Amino acid sequence: MNKLARIAVLCFVVFLVFAPAVALAQDGAAPMVGKTSLGYLGIGLGAGLAAIGGGIALGMLGSSVVDAAARQPEMRGQLTTIMFIVAALIEGLALFALVICILCLFIG
């Protein structure tokens, strides 16, 4: 998969994580004041997708590092360092998505 396809997939995944929380949490057509059940559903769906996406990404990362270390054992130290950096970025993205969903709960 080339870089452009990876960027497109990443943008689509980010859209899938944030769209339900933002769109459903700001349900302005509801006659009642406050959140509707659809708003809570959107926030929960966004947070759940962020957690599931982060878990899948970390699983794929671990699998790739184990596979690469099995092919070239002498690169194990460098692979471990890169793995920890990428794992931190993945966790940061999942935490950022969770914070956005929580902000939608209080702001919207």
Image (cartoon, rainbow, N blue to C red):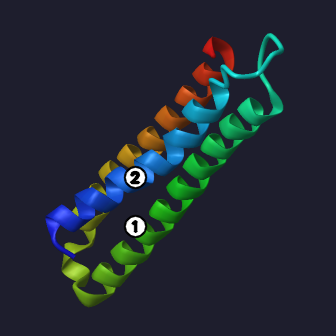
What distance separates the C-alpha of mark 1 from that of mark 2?
Answer: 8 Å
Name the amino acid type tagged 1: Leu
Marking on residue 87: 2
- Check disc 1 and report the residue beneath it: 61
Q: Residue at x 75, y 39 (%)?
A: 41
Q: Residue at x 40, y 52 (%)?
A: 87
Marking on residue 32: none
Q: Residues within 10 Å of mark 2 (few under 14, many from 20)?
A: some
Would you say 106 lies left or right of 7 here?
A: right
Q: Taking 10 as reference, is 99 above or below it?
A: above
**Residue 7 horizontal/vertical position (percent):** 24, 57
Indicate the quadrant containing the C terminus: top left, top right, bottom left or bottom right: top right
Q: Taking 81 as reference, is 66 above or below it?
A: below
Quadrant of the rendered image containing residue 26: top right
**Residue closer to the observer: 73 or 82:** 82
Q: Residues within 10 Å of mark 1 (few under 14, many from 20)?
A: some
